[in-house]
């Protein structure tokens, strides 16, 4: 028999209303009884990743956030610009749970042996709706963490570690040995830097501030280019010559950075070109946009020949493409190196109610490197 | 023994000078004696394709074109904006011949049987330097045209026909059954429309003027969207729903059109979507930029999910990728349907000297649909 979980728990919801208002609230939802192959996890740590912020706030202007509701049951509302409502059409009226991943303790299990084996274990989980006190999922989707691992240490086992490993794996499958990463001082960027140092892969780190360059250099990064420096284009070209990187992963998405990377790749390749070709180099140059830290339009000047590509890159389709065995190998590496290569650092741990405070939103909503929040959905909540 | 070719002939040259001046001139070059496996072709028809204009004028401002030189040996010069000189660096000081493709009569041949068999034949040829009275090339690179074919009919056997067939072949190899094409009323676009009608392929034609829409509709096109119409985005979405096209070939390159196509593809796919996905549809949407009719920067708003790609597409790397047998099959189809599917239409036939007249440059240099020029390098030239 399974332990009986609490009958209900708080869950964070995001709702886009037809009148262009976003509403984020906490609702009490019944805790499902686990099916035979399922477990109930008491979520104790769940990060606010940029991809969560996208779902949380949609196209709303977080500068307009207004708090209402009772203490402990806050409601925050914000205006959505009318021009952005078209992109929101598919989610209007749908009260959506949020939170890609997290970690916690298994407090109830179905009757299967696999489920019962997890009772009391600290597990890392992915699958959405983690901004909640309790989450019921398949035992097979839980990643048991080594004894003694705190939920906070396992909260970010999937999105950042698998994204960083996925970039390296994408690079390898394209037959390449070096890559470029932007917003490189982020938790994800620091992980990628550790992977590349460990695996002997060339990495060009692009950051936006001198202190971010200093941070990465202190962590052993050989190639760091500060996009705010007047010599950025030259610095980047030199780093591309040094590493031979022709593939990049860009977290910013908007603005001119993706195009600048292609421009510098072409310049780096042409440093050794022997004759003029009107179509540019024949070496394929690729930038994958995997994030949207800059929501502005993407703009580029096509001065990098014809052998180039730009496109979206997303973790889950990538994992599907490489198949379950290859994906499992990546997951096992994450657990094995959880406190070293894949360690995450958080600015602050907050409760669900605090996540709805405009003052907190103003900080984590900026998606700024170095302002990473962790939610503990069972913090400051009376056991129900 | 081979027939003896004339000892010299005129050849058009394009030169970028270090002081940011472009100079186009006619020079007399000796006619090479053909090696055993070579022939000399008297070029009688060679088109001015957009890709030729790129090499011909580089980054020069054609509005500044100035004529000088003796009659029959004109020289035209134009200013190159300083900011564009960096992109021209690799060709500064190189006097480059121009002209991708053409057709003419074999007037001399080397000793091999293959070369001698072509003597007197009208052949289509590709390989650059066709804006010249005589061109020496390998017999194997000549495409013999059926008896009675005029050089003007065979002048555009390669670039446009193989590009149109290459688009269809690219679509097929990605497992798709419909495609989108921009600048669709061009010679190339009309060819693609005839191919798609003949082969039963869905084609969405994007044009920029109502009269271009009328032209394509008169040629049997079912889906034509006028980008100048206020209902363009809606029209395009409807055409994408009707055809299911998720791949596009864009000749314009610059501006917002490529992104608008991705936006409308996503909207078309989501008309039948059953649930909201924060990452957009999982159907891959692709736009290949194969031309640069609009030299402005490319700009797009990323409102089409994460399953998308944009990239350069170029005929010759494509032909290399599919291999010689597949490429030869495409060439044979061109010859078989030269006067039907692959017929080209020209606004005007001009001489080499006329190609250097600013008044003519002002017309063909615009690269406008419906202003296609054919050069006859042996027109108005005394036999040398």
Image: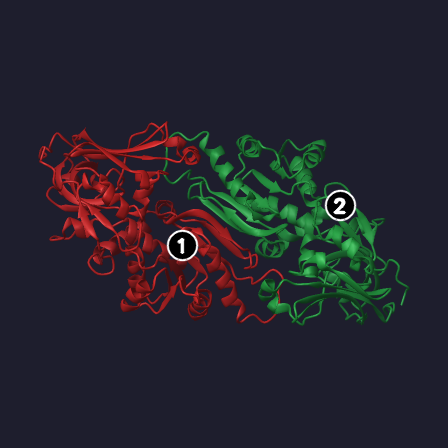
Chain colours: A red, B green
For residue A231, what is the image quadrant? bottom left
Quadrant placement of the C terminus of chain B? bottom right
- Identify the residue at image location x=75%, y=41%: B340
Estimate the x, y position of residue B135 in percent, counting from the top left.
78, 64
Query: B232 and A99: which one is in front?
Result: B232
Q: Which mark is residue A25?
A: none
- Is A216 located above or below residue B276 in the figure? below
Q: Is residue A75 left or right of residue B335?
A: left
Q: Residues within 10 Å of mark 2 (few under 14, many from 20)?
A: many
Estimate the x, y position of residue A313 in percent, counting from the top left.
40, 49
Estimate the x, y position of residue A45 in percent, counting from the top left.
18, 46
For residue A337, what is the image quadrant? bottom left
- Is A66 located above or below residue B95 in the figure? above
Query: B217 and B295: which one is in front?
Result: B295
Q: Which mark is residue B344?
A: 2
- Is B7 located above or below residue A152 in the figure? below
């Amino acid at each position: 028999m399974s332990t009986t979980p609490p009958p209900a728990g708080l869950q964070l919801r995001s709702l886009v209303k037809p009148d262009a208002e976003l509403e984020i609230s906490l609702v009490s939802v019944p805790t499902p009884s686990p099916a035979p192959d399922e477990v109930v996890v008491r979520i104790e740590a769940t990060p606010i990743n940029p991809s969560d912020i996208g779902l949380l706030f949609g196209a709303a202007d977080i500068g307009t956030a207004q708090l209402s509701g009772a203490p402990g049951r806050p409601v925050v509302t914000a205006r959505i610009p009318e021009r952005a409502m078209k992109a929101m059409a598919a989610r209007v009226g749908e009260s959506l749970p949020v939170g890609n991943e997290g970690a916690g303790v298994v407090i109830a299990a179905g009757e299967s042996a696999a489920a019962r084996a997890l009772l009391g274990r600290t597990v890392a989980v992915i699958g959405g709706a983690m901004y909640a006190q309790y989450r019921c999922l398949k035992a097979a989707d839980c990643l048991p963490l080594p004894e003694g691992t705190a939920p906070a240490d396992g909260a970010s086992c999937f999105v950042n570690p698998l994204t960083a490993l996925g970039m390296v794996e994408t690079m390898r499958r394209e037959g390449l040995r070096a890559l470029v990463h932007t917003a490189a001082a982020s938790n994800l960027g620091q992980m990628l830097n550790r992977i590349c140092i460990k695996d002997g892969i060339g990495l060009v780190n692009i950051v936006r501030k001198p202190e971010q360059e200093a941070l990465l250099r202190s962590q052993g990064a050989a190639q760091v280019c500060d996009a705010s420096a007047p010599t950025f284009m030259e610095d980047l070209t030199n780093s591309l010559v040094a590493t031979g990187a022709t593939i990049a992963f860009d977290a910013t998405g908007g603005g001119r950075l993706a195009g600048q990377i292609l421009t510098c790749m072409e310049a780096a390749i042409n440093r050794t070109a022997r004759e003029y070709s009107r179509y540019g180099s024949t070496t394929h140059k690729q930038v994958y946009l995997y994030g949207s830290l800059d929501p502005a339009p993407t703009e580029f000047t096509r001065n990098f020949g014809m052998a180039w590509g730009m496109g979206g890159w997303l973790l889950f389709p990538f994992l599907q493409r490489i198949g379950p065995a290859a994906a499992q190998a990546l997951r096992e590496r994450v657990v094995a190196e959880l406190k070293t290569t894949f360690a995450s650092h958080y600015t602050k741990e907050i409760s669900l109610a605090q996540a709805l405070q405009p003052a907190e939103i103003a900080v984590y909503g900026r998606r700024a490197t170095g302002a990473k929040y962790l939610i503990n959905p069972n913090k400051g909540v009376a056991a129900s």
